[in-house]
Image (cartoon, grey):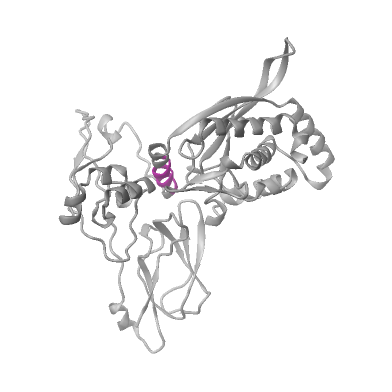
Amino acid sequence: MPIPILMPALSPTMEEGTLAKWLVKEGDEVRSGDLIAEIETDKATMEVEAVDEGTVGKLLVAEGTEGVPVNETIAVILEEGEDASAVDSAPTPKPAAASPVATSDATEPKPEKATVTAAPAKAKPSGERIFASPLAKRIAKDKGLDLALVTGSGPRGRIVKADVEAAPKTSARAAGKAPAVTSSIDARAFYEVGSYDEIPLNSMRKTIARRLTQSKQEIPHYYLTIDCVLDELLKVRKHLNAEGADAGVKLSVNDFVVRAAALALKKVPEANVSFADDALLQHRHSDVGIAVALEGGLITPIIRHADEKGLAEISAEAKELAARARDKKLSPAEFEGGSFSVSNLGMFGIKNFTAVINPPQAAIMAVGAGEPRPIIVDGEVKAATVMTVTLSCDHRAIDGALGAQLLAAFKSYIEYPPSMLL
């Protein structure tokens, strides 16, 4: 019996991938553990190994094919004694459904939302994975709604809050029908054809759009801002860099920020949490993500157990992770999960900004530039280097007073770096 090779799920959130390159060709003999293909997700390119041994009977998906769904058959391996005719009995990939594109009238813009009527929902086969947001799952559970009978209006059919709220409990179970859903406005409707260049979204930009839209829709954000005086930190940094120059140590302000955030989470463990529908997950370690800008997007590699690492180790790991992130060589384990994130735009001269929480985390810190500002010390106006940071919190998991405690702990470490050694 021919053995199908399926598009692997390289991470818990992966729904589709790009078959970047085949490392085998039809007729090749493969053994378990042999590299057979390179799969590109939205943030990394990974090599895939063969699980079974045999002869490559047919490559069903061409190199460079984008949007191949997880668990889709991409190739077939023939077992000993089978010939090419056996390939016909193997499953073949289903064609990806074309995304409907709203038509536009260049001379007569129509800003109204286009209404799309969803097809009747059919019960999904037993065992088939159902993609739904955590909030949609909770609402469906409360309503006693079978998600297998709900048609999702989100990306790639993902079931969102609006779908389950609009689906009547009785009719959804009995008839399996979902109400009409409304699509977002197509920006093309507002501009004349030829007045813009259309740049197709790559998989990274699609994922960013989907995840951050979901974050702002489902997570009740609130923001806390505080100013931190950096003069003592800059003195310590200058001294440590001079001492460690021979060893190649060159600390950045962001290294101190990551260390201070990790220790603040350890000091205020109630804020080192993730929201999980019916529970809070209180993390035992401070796993701090650092936002890294890439061409066409961004990624947040994670420094694991940052609360247990010194400044030099954090600095070296941050540089190494950032370099591999830009080369798309990170594994999913290196950028998924985490308990907190730091986004620093100070190098661009940005004074203050707010960041969007990266699920499943419950907080992210936006760091601005350190700049000379007047401050009042003992009733006198003095010049100091001041950095503004803004903490975005998930109000489901971190209340305002708790978020304030976390930010106050961070400020105490940043303003007096020797306390990081205690």
- Let me know if residue 196 appears in the view: yes
- Residue at x 30% of width, y 83% of height: 85
Residue 213 horizontal/vertical position (percent):
39, 39
Residue 190 horizontal/vertical position (percent):
27, 29
Quarter holding the N terminus is bottom left
**Which is more toward the observer, 273 or 320?**
273
- Corner quadrant of residue 109: top left
Looking at the image, how many numbered discs can be counted on the residues? Answer: 0
Residue 156 horizontal/vertical position (percent):
32, 51
**Which is more toward the observer, 417 or 270?**
270
Task: Tell whether position 207 is magenta.
Answer: yes
Residue 29 horizontal/vertical position (percent):
47, 81
**Which is more toward the observer, 418 or 297?**
418
- Residue at x 35% of width, y 80% of height: 2
Reply above or below: 53 against 249: below
Which stretch did the figure color magenta? 204-212
- Let me know if residue 159 appears in the view: no
383 sits to left or right of 5 = right
- Residue at x 31% of width, y 43% of height: 161
200 sits to left or right of 21 = left
Quarter holding the C terminus is top right
173 sits to left or right of 289 = left
Task: Tell whether position 399 is magenta.
Answer: no
- Corner quadrant of residue 28: bottom left
Reply above or below: 56 against 292: below
Q: Residue furthest bottom?
A: 81
256 sits to left or right of 400 = right
Most prominent secondary structure in the magenta stretch?
helix
